[in-house]
Image (cartoon, coloured by chain):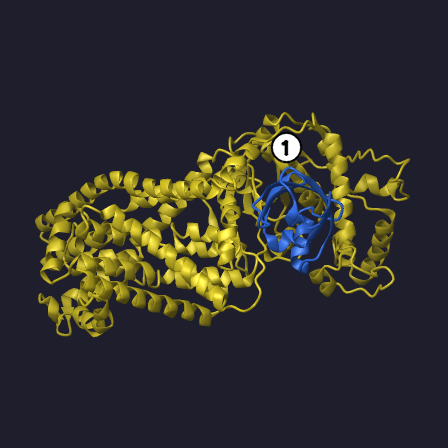
Chain colours: A blue, B yellow
Amino acid sequence: MTLDLGKPGSTYIIKGMELPQTIEKHLEALGMTYGTKVDVLNNKSKGTLIIKVRGTRFAVGKGISGKIEVSD
Amino acid sequence: MTAVMKQDATIGFVGNPNSGKTTLFNAFSGANLKVANWPGVTVEKVEGMMKFKNQRYKLVDLPGTYSLTSYTMEEQVARNYILSDDVDVIVDVVDASSLERNLYLTLQLLELGKPVVVALNMMDIVEKRGLEIDMHRLPEMLGVPVIPVSARKRKGLSVLMHAVHHHINAKHPDKLIHGHDFTSARESKHAHEHHRDYTMVYSDEIEDKIDLIIDELRSRYPEIRNYRWHALKLLERDQEITEKYPLDMPDVIDRSYESDIINEKYDFISEIMNEVIMNRAEREASTDKVDAVLTNKYWSIPIFLGIIGVVFFLTFFVGDFFKGYFEIAINWLGQAAASGLTSAGASPGLISLVSDGIIAGVGSILTFLPNIFMLFLALAFLEDSGYMSRVAYVMDGIMGHLGLSGRAFIPLILGFGCTVPAIMASRALETKKDRFRVMLITPFMSCSARLTVYILFSEMFFPKHAMLAAYSLYVIGFVTAMLVALIIHLFDKTETDHQLLIELPEYKAPSARTVLIYVGEKVKDYLSKAGTIIFIASIVMWFIMNFGIHGYTSDVSMSIGANIGKAIVPFFRPLGLGYWQLALALIAGISAKEVVVSSTAVLYGVSNINAAAGMSTLAGLLGASGFTALNAYCLMIFCLLYVPCAATLAVIKRESESWKWTGFVALFQISVAWVITFAVYHIGTLLI
């Protein structure tokens, strides 16, 4: 599944992403690499999420969350 | 170890965004900051000075960044500066409450080979969560001093400076005790030499490659000082370094090892986390509880509107309360100056210049200081508490319908304060398209300079509903900005992906010092504007009103100003603004919007324009020439929407790097202002 479908309170593991290079590099620098755990804290039902990665909270839009492949 | 005996040692402050880096920097340097841009780029450079143990230190606040790649301007600026000879020691500000992510930058800084001292900030949040950080083990694993500080409470500052003082010559980490489990997966033939010398040791595959590249670099580029870092960058296929030091080693650098290097760094960070974090019982952070309310699906937008309401309440009601005292003081000053000059035997021309020109013009602006102060105080509070970045999340859905990321809302809110920093804040936006759109719509957000116009004219012509009239202009400005964004979005055929990505820091009580420095800067800006642009505009206005082509004249209608005003008045007549004095004031207002008020004061010769007596004089003068409440409202709408000020145009030029775009924005705003004011005037005339 993709991250935008994540439920608040659940934890997922990043399996891959398909985003423009600069955004992918930025996410990697923030520690969102293959195999990283992502906690979904909030989901506004349209794919705009609040997530927690390596101890930091981020708000991500559907343009990004919809292109990150995750597993439970 | 002895400290360097250089004249000024330079300390570079580096850290993630939201790590408290700027708060710590301010704690050291005080308010005596020098703000400029880094050469050639639009990234802000802030410098300060301090003294410690008879050594003078130059402090440089580097841009907040998560990594030191060359993908963004900020990161390039930071890393090139650290690599240069200009910096002697680095203070790496680490947010202890998100240690894992912050250490990633630390590991990269250590690889640059300059002396590093880690300032571990926000320990109070860590303690509140019931966690403990092993302050013995952490520096042991990093090989550099780690000093716990509280930037907000100004604690640990002298210990930090002491460490800086002692480690300024420490080019290598001294004592590294990693304690990797050498018998298992991390067994390495590099263990012996490398684990003693370097904090971050990679897998054998990468370490072998590093060794080969270093040998090649040594023979081809002997001038390089830090071979290991350059080798790593070549393995990452870093654009800047690959172009600067090309190597022909296709077997070794067979692909980009960037992801491998990132992953191995994070693996090592996990190792550090396991060793240094004690009591790892996950407690629900208080931020999560606050966020459960503030970013709630149903409540987030009403709460946001409520907060904005409070900001306006503070600006208008509380600000106005203090404004009354300022008026009394300015009024007294005007009279004192006039009587002082008269008794000193000054000529009537000079008395008129001082009291009708300078004090009327500049004084009319100074009285608004309390309103401006309250507004910026509220904005500083929102930013420093961590709420501002939540606005991006809360507004993302709505902004998505307008083709913008939720992050675009932050410059729009800042626009209530001043358009210039708001446009600078558009830099943080994800795409260039978003940036240009935000530059186009942000000037419609009513800034504090325009407030001066509303307060004057709504108090004169809508005495019972002054607040309502002023509020309505804020709404019109906001709606115009949104409609313009919507129309552009509807006509734009290219697909928009809103790629919102913003860090949400922990909520914290704002630091009084940070807030005061921020507000102090704005007040200083405002006062210096009153002292320069408005001062000059008031004098120029007085001259063109009192001089005609034949010299000094007491007949205003013969003056140069009257002739200019009369020449441009046809443009304003269809808007209900067919008064040459006002036309002239509006043109002068392009220098700064407050000039509309100060010029009106000078043009109508009212020296105490904001006091009740002055207002009734001006209202009487205007009313006698058929100027009604509708005309006043049209004037306010035109002021709201036309080109904000010369400084805004300058900043749009700087940010867009395009004269064409800047010219378009200016023309667009004048056209929008004209069309909307025209519509309001004619619909209003029909209704009344």
Residue B137 or residue B587, whichever sits in front: B587
> Which residue occupies 24% across, 64% down?
B683
> Which residue occupies 48% across, 33% down?
B509
Image quadrant assignment for residue B238:
bottom right
Q: Quadrant of the N terminus of chain B?
A: top right
Image quadrant assignment for residue B59:
top right
Residue A35: x and y, percent? 76, 45
Q: Is residue B272 above or below residue B547?
A: above
> Which residue occupies 64% across, 49% down?
A4
Relative to residue A63, is residue B329 drawn left or right? left
Residue B29: x and y, percent? 50, 40
Q: Is residue B676 above or below residue B108?
A: below
Residue B226: x and y, percent? 75, 52
- The residue to which callout 1 is attached is B147
Q: Quadrant of the C terminus of chain B?
A: bottom left
Residue B275 or residue B505, whichever sits in front: B505
Relative to residue A65, is residue B666 drawn left or right? left
Chain holding disc 1: B
Q: Amino acid at mark 1?
A: Ile
